[in-house]
Image: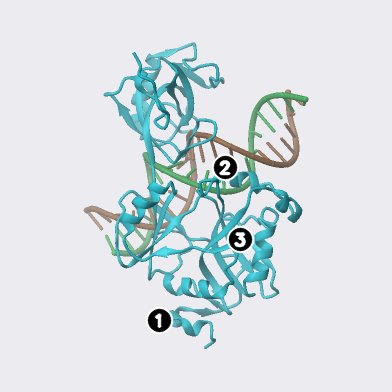
Chain colours: A cyan, B brown, C green
Amino acid sequence: MTDVLARLSSDDREAAKREDMPDWLTPMKAKLTHEQFSDPDWVYERKLDGERVIAYVTQNGEARLCSRNKKCLNKSYPELEQALVDNCPPGVIVDGEVVAFNDDDISDFQLLQARMKVSNRDEARASNVQVYFYLFDCLYIDGHNITNCSLRGRKKLLKEALQWTDPLRFTAHKNEDGISYYHEACEKGWEGLIAKRANARYAHSRSSDWLKFKCLMQQEFVICGFTQPEGERVGFGALLLGFYRNKQLVYAGDVGTGFDDATLKELGGRLESISRETSPFDKNSPSGDDITFVTPKLVCEIAFTEWTQNDNLRHPRFLGLRRDKKASKVHKETETQKAES
DNA sequence: TTCCGACAGTGGGGTCGCAAT
DNA sequence: ATTGCGACCCCACTATCGGAA
């Protein structure tokens, strides 16, 4: 038994499988849940909003960065490639998230997108968007595939294997109090938490051994129009959403999911009956052949992850109609409103 | 029998690059 | 030169089916 694996429990040592380093391991994915919990058999990590990257550091000491869909990302993050070459032993596969932070220290996907286009080291140095690689798992080390070992065992080997210096960061976790940590996370403006079953092996699929506790935003919007359905879809494609700012309707993007077939048909019929030619929006109205505008009087509840820079919703989904709210009272909830007459 | 996981299909914002206009 | 489209990232959700529990 090698020194590296000697640090594992006897069960984990048995689970480690000696084999050549694989070219590709399908990344494990988390399932979304709305029921948060505290359980001592689980650990809780900060959920970072960035790009998933699996890094292969070969026996020759070369680093290959792969996206979730097997695309090579070395050109996007040359400084991460170099950091892995310098600080990770050869013959290791690690799993993590590449992120960029905004001024409030919140992982910011829009900022990261500005960095994804970088294609060499000079450009990376010149970019003012700094990226970090938060590692949270180790799949292969010291000639062994350790995906059948427990999460705790893999994390232990991960922590000891690398020299932890920026831009490489170890993803810390809490061993208890999932619920209070979740509330803390949302107050800080984090994207949420990932809860992981501490003794679970690494599954090459979406698994309920990893669960997303996402912090959600939710508010009402005015339905201002709809798009035509495509393919087998019935009723309508998406709803055009708006809110009032200075008594003008501002476009907040579209929502196209969260409906079952019955709702698509029913609501689609209702929208047809209140359709109109002119846009209810202010001068920044969307336009297009497949858009039908409606009289802005129906209000719906929408859950989403965040506002984008253009006043659009990210990851929106329809929760239901609101009958108890007047359309004219719908504002962006983060904006302070003057009293309306 | 019921439930769960995997897939396909629909929809979202944003970015880039290339082809058609 | 501008526009449109697909391919990437990040997703949520519904409907369906077959196998596990």
Q: Residue at x 39, y 39 (%)?
A: A217
Which residue, given by chain and number where applicable, does mark 1 sit on? Answer: A11
Q: Are marks 1 and 3 in contact (CB under 8 Å)?
A: no
Mark 1 belongs to which subunit? Answer: A
In the image, residue A246 sits, relative to residue A21, either above or below, namely above
Which residue, given by chain and number where applicable, does mark 3 sit on? Answer: A167
Q: Residues within 10 Å of mark 1 (few under 14, many from 20)?
A: few
In percent of width and height, residue A16 lies at 49, 79
Mark 2 belongs to which subunit? Answer: A
Q: Residues within 10 Å of mark 2 (few under 14, many from 20)?
A: some
Q: Which mark is residue A110?
A: 2
Q: Residue at x 66, y 63 (%)?
A: A64
In percent of width and height, residue A166 lies at 60, 62
Q: First in sequence: mark 2 or mark 1?
A: 1
Which amino acid, by three-letter code, is at mark 3?
Pro
Please, which residue is most extreme toward the bottom here? A1
